[in-house]
Amino acid sequence: MRIGILTGGGDVPGLNPCIKAVVNRVADQGHEVIGIRRGWAGILQHNPEDPESASRHFLDLSPEVVRTIDRTGGTMLHTSRTNPQRVQTESVPEFLRGAMVGDGPHDYTDHALRVLEDQRLDVLIPIGGDDTLSYGQRLHEEGFPVIAIPKTMDNDVHGTEYCIGFSTAVTRGVQFITNLRTATGSHERIAVVELFGRNSGETSLVTAYLSGVDRALISEVPFDIDKLSAFLVEDRAKNPSKYAILTISEGAQLIGGEIVETGEADAFGHRKLGGIGHITADLIKERTGISMIEQRLGYLMRSGSPDSLDLMVAINYAVMAADLAMEGATGRMVALRGGTYTSVPISVTAEGEKRVDVDELYDRSEYRPKVRHVSGKPMFLY
Amino acid sequence: MSGVLGVLTAGGDCPGLNAVIRAVVSRATEHHGAEIVGILNGWEGLMDGRTRPLDRDDVRGILQRGGTILGTSRKDPYVHGEGYESVRHTIERNGIESLIVIGGDGTLRTALKLSEDGLPVVGVPKTIDNDIAATDYTFGFDTALSIATDAVDRIATTAESHNRIMLVEVMGRTKGWIATYAAIAGGADALLIPELPYDLDTIAGILKKRHRQGRTYSVVVVAEGVAPPPGREVKNRLDAFGFERLGGVAYQIAPELEQRTGFETRVTVLGHLQRGGTPTAFDRVLGTRFGAAAADIALAGGDRVMVAVQGDQMVTVPLEEACRTVRGVDETLYELAATFFN
């Protein structure tokens, strides 16, 4: 059996251990693993008429090749946000341009299926977030065997309680916030810490909950800047060290405002978010006269090595996906449900959106985490 | 002298401050039998009389803690007050005979003025930027450098995964010490520091050459104080000492590099993360040496001097000399980093 594997979307800690574990699980059964480089872009950009170019897009993964990859962060296969069913005209490879119709975006699924056949792949394991996996679902619908592994630092893939990368992002967030306390306290300021998290406020919420910051703004609940400023002034006054810390999800919005987006949309239609922390800090300063510390954690949350929990889940998901592949049980996504490792139909990812249960975990009027009940909740509370 | 010694910390937070305070207090009280008055919130406390007595027990358990138990501020008696007159009451009421001032070049210039106005002072150089003249190292630099290097290491894995250029902006107002050391330690592919003018086309050329050779990602370390690209500006504000508060120049450079190379370019600004957290072993030792030496010198009647480390020796240098110039990165060090830009 020839098993293809790829990583798509943003890199998270745990991808390399995941790739390594798939390879090692199937190698002694005589199966081969072929790494596809740069996510779905490796498939889109491969021209079957030009076999010489295959080495640019595909890589044979033996246990020898992957022996040391788990010692570094990132993904040895590299990644992209390319989605073959929505390719912008400027991203269409040269050899496909001849048959291009219309202004785009273009659907190159027929080409993708041809490439998978050309590479004699029997099953494909995409590791990614909802965007990457949505194309896995598409290939599954087209009849190609797929087994999906969910990863995102936002933990927002529908159908699983856990995605690879979340724990490390929170671990880092908590650590960085702790490190900012002395600088913020020394100057008696208010710190605004902007965290990654496009639509789901989970990362911001859980980081805030664990680090005990004064207030936390999440994407799901628009905020009133005057009320927020008053809270922070009060928090700062009550703190014996005379400072306050606010976390803000990059997708957060002012009441009546809009998500702050900058830059061009990527192939998935995502724009680069960011900037709301800066805007909010300026508005608070304007209202309170207190000096601010602005800190965007950004890539620092999801780059580098995984913590032990992400290592655990990455390896276990890999083992499960490899076993499913060898059993021929495809069209599945490996998942955690009820705290137990399992798999679900890959179509589940498209059946809903995974969002923070705001009423259970957040106080809308106080702008801070408030966990109503813990008993009965999954390990990560949602 | 066996009288009362004042101690204060001013300016930005810096890992190792508590190690210095602990050494000053322990050395002065245990070794010399002197009394120590801690001034709270930097010069502000000296102006408004907020002080607390400190003994050995007050400084137990603080060695490894970030921040400063005394607090700090950016107030300055010569900017926000009447100079010596605005601190005289605190000095006299506490019987302070000599003041140990732990601060960066702005703070040390204020200390020099106080000394000229009649208050004996001993300075301890404090800045993560490592740019104070007359000392080889300042405490806090090693911790900031460790944090920056760690970030470069991690960011490199993301840069490679996404085939991107990643700019890592580190502190360094007018000098690129953290940037240069982090670039060498982290194996950066390009380095921009305030000491040297840079040419975006040259840098883009280096990065494009890497790309052609199959190394389809790059990490560029940028000191916050480099000039923005021509035609762009970074909005700056002046702080109480008249220093520009920098940060964000990498956001101006990124689109220029993206445009010249055609590679996706992203920015990480480390900002205050570099000041936070636990000091490294090196900074704890250096801070302890500085603090003990400052107490010895102040109690021996030293005035208008700064403690410094030169080679492996603790020395004193005239405060004027320390304040006169800022020390930049030696060009040979930049060239060493540049050896690996390929």
Image (cartoon, grey):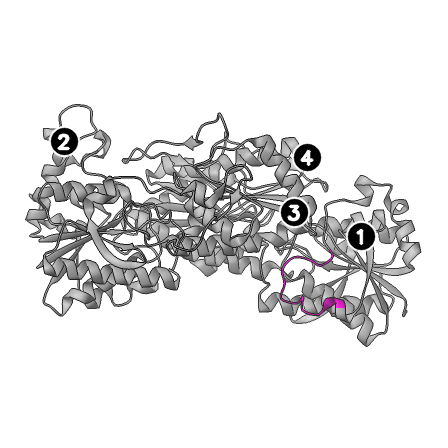
Instruction: Give the letter of the chain under mark 1.
Output: B
Question: Residue at point 9% right, 37% down?
Answer: A110
Where is residue B301 drawn, in percent x and y?
Answer: 87, 66
- Amino acid at circle 4: Gly
Measured Cα–Cα span from mark 3 to mark 1: 27 Å
Q: Are marks 1 and 2 in contact (CB under 8 Å)?
A: no
Q: Answer yes or no: do the residues labelled 3 and 1 have beta carbons within 8 Å?
A: no
Residue A243: which numbered mark, if any?
3
First in sequence, mark 3 or 2: give its number: 2
The crowding category of the residue bearing disc 1, from other C-alpha atoms within 10 Å (few below 14, some 14 to 19, many at least 20), is many
Which residue is labeled 4 in the image? Answer: A289
Whether residue A379 sits left or right of residue A268 in the image: it is: right
Which chain is indicated by disc 2?
A: A
What distance separates the C-alpha of mark 1 from that of mark 2? 70 Å
Q: Secondary structure at mark 3?
A: loop
Which residue type does callout 2 highlight? Arg
* Residue B255 sits above or below residue A376 on the image: above
**Main secondary structure type of the part rendered in magenta:** loop
Quarter of the image where one finds residue A43: top left
| Chain part drawn in magenta | B58-70
The chain letter for the residue carrying disc 4 is A
Q: What is the count of numbered marks? A: 4
Q: Nearer the viewer, residue B114 or A281?
A: A281
Residue topped by disc 1: B111
**In this orientation, does residue B58 appear?**
yes
Depth order, front residue of B12/B244: B12
Q: Residues within 10 Å of mark 4 (few under 14, many from 20)?
A: few
Q: Residue at x 34, y 65 (%)?
A: A71
Q: Nearer the viewer, mark 2 or mark 4?
A: 4
